[in-house]
Image: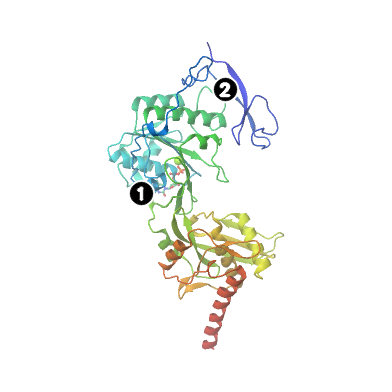
Amino acid sequence: MSPRPTTIHVCSACGHESPRWSGQCPGCGEWNTLVEELRTRPAGASGRASGQRAGSAGATPVPLGSVAAEDHSRLSTGIGELDNVLGGGLVPGSLVLIGGSPGVGKSTLTTMALANLVAGGRRTLYVSAEESPAQIRLRAERLSAGAPLRIPVIAETDLTTVLATLERERPEVCVIDSVQTLNCAELTSAAGSVAQVREVATEIMRVAKANRIAVLLVGHVTKDGALAGPRVLEHLVDCVLQFEGERERTYRTVRAIKNRFGSTNEAGVFEMRDDGLVEVLDASARFVAEATRAPGSVVLCAMEGSRPLLVEVQALVSPSELEPPRRVVAGIDRNRLALVLAVLGRHAGIGLGNADVFVNVVGGVRIDEPGADLAVALAVASAARGIALQSAPGQPLACFGELGLTGELRSVAHGDRRLAEAARFGMGDVAEPQRFRSLRDAVRAVVAHERAAADRVALTRS
Ligand code: TYD
Ligand code: MG
């Protein structure tokens, strides 16, 4: 029987399938996301004969206690921060999706992992559907980790060829770079489309599970940071890692946003050097040393997963010629800045309705926790008043805490760990919710204190 082609409409936002086109997706309610896909569905395509047919005897449930525990011996990538984020290394037969914007270093990181695995005697395979073997070699030659030049590579975009190669070579670890550029020839839609990405991922998973291949699937992200392709991709894989940072900056973070074999709490910090990515083992020390200690700069005691991390938050306030004035952020959520500015104006007497406000987390680090509110508020207050804030002489002001809409400061998780991290750098006087009840108190105390100190200096000079 020849496969019967059927046309379906797939939502490019949620992957919902529907037989007819409609303006609004019945699955997620988004508009204009349904895309027509031609899909050939050979009967019993995946080879997994369904057990739900009429006449089937059904399956026999087994108590969990008598299920043989799978051997979860992990493969170390030789990159401590990556192993840590993965929950202790790669699990054989698992699918790990690594998402990141172009140039962040996905190919570099995965090549380095394979280089270490090859050096440790593991069978590996690097499948590139984006670059030629010569280009891959050029990158590998820069890397100092492991044995990059011994990594077996194929440059191939055809899914069937890749699957056949995987089945023949049976590597222990394989990199697919990238899931959006592999192409399944049976589908008429272009590589990277919803149907293609889903098919590619499903087929690779099938072969990976059958042959116990650990797969690192590289994925592109769209401009707003979401993984390009259907949501189903994230459901399908065992682990989703997000690789963040900007091309022009040196620091990058890797964090797990889904992990079936470990916690999603861990994050690793890397620095892009000439010879590849280097783990930054004491990122706090770096960021504190580099902090400017100028007006508009504070140090935020943040949490990266279960580890405290001190990062510099900078703000610039300048008279605006625009209506409405500019609000530019890097590393924090724009809506969070709007909230902080509203609270500053309403409850702390610092109105910035006629000023442009820029806020930046230094080093390309992204902070997604409400504990950053106070740091943003104090950086902006410090910039607006032109007063440098400090925790101790010569040390920048350290702070953390969430802002409530009534101007109160709210505690955040792991306060003790954040304080301990600040203390490690001699920043004893940390502005935080245990010390100040409201933003007004905090602003008054730290800004006024510094102003008084500045005045005393001015007096003794004159
Ligand atoms: P790449 O890994 O190709 O990024 P992605 O696969 O995510 O698109 O490389 C990212 C950038 O890093 C690239 O512009 C070149 C730079 N780079 C270094 O600075 N040092 C290095 O050792 C390597 C290999 C790349
Ligand atoms: Mg790449």
Please tell me which residue is depicted at 47% across the width and 57% down the height of the picture. Answer: 303
Estimate the spatial distance between the alpha carbons at disc 2 and disc 1, rounded to whole Å. 42 Å
Instruction: Give 98 or 306, whichever is nearer the viewer.
Output: 306
- Whether residue 51 is situated above or below residue 272 in the rendered picture: above
Colour approach in the figure:
rainbow
Q: Is residue 275 among what the camera can see?
A: no
Please tell me which residue is depicted at 58% across the width and 69% down the height of the picture. Answer: 437
Q: Which mark is residue 39?
A: 2
- Whether residue 120 is situated above or below residue 368 in the rendered picture: above
Q: Position of residue 318 (x, y in %)?
A: 63, 66
Instruction: Give 220 or 83, whichever is nearer the viewer.
Output: 83
The amino acid type of the residue labelled 2 equals Arg
Instruction: Give 423 or 220, whichever is nearer the viewer.
Output: 423
Secondary structure of the residue carrying numbered label 1: helix
Asked where in the image residue 117 lies, by quadrant, the reply is top left
Residue that carries the numbered disc 1 in the rendered image: 80
Please tell me which residue is depicted at 46% across the width and 65% down the height of the picture. Answer: 419
Instruction: Give 201 or 224, whichever is nearer the viewer.
Output: 201
The amino acid type of the residue labelled 1 equals Gly
- Count of numbered labels shown in the rendering: 2
Secondary structure of the residue carrying numbered label 2: strand
Sequence-first tag of 2 and 1: 2
Mark 2 Cα shell of 10 Å, populated few (<14), some (14-19), many (≥20): some
Mark 1 Cα shell of 10 Å, populated few (<14), some (14-19), many (≥20): some
Q: Position of residue 298 (x, y in %)?
A: 52, 66
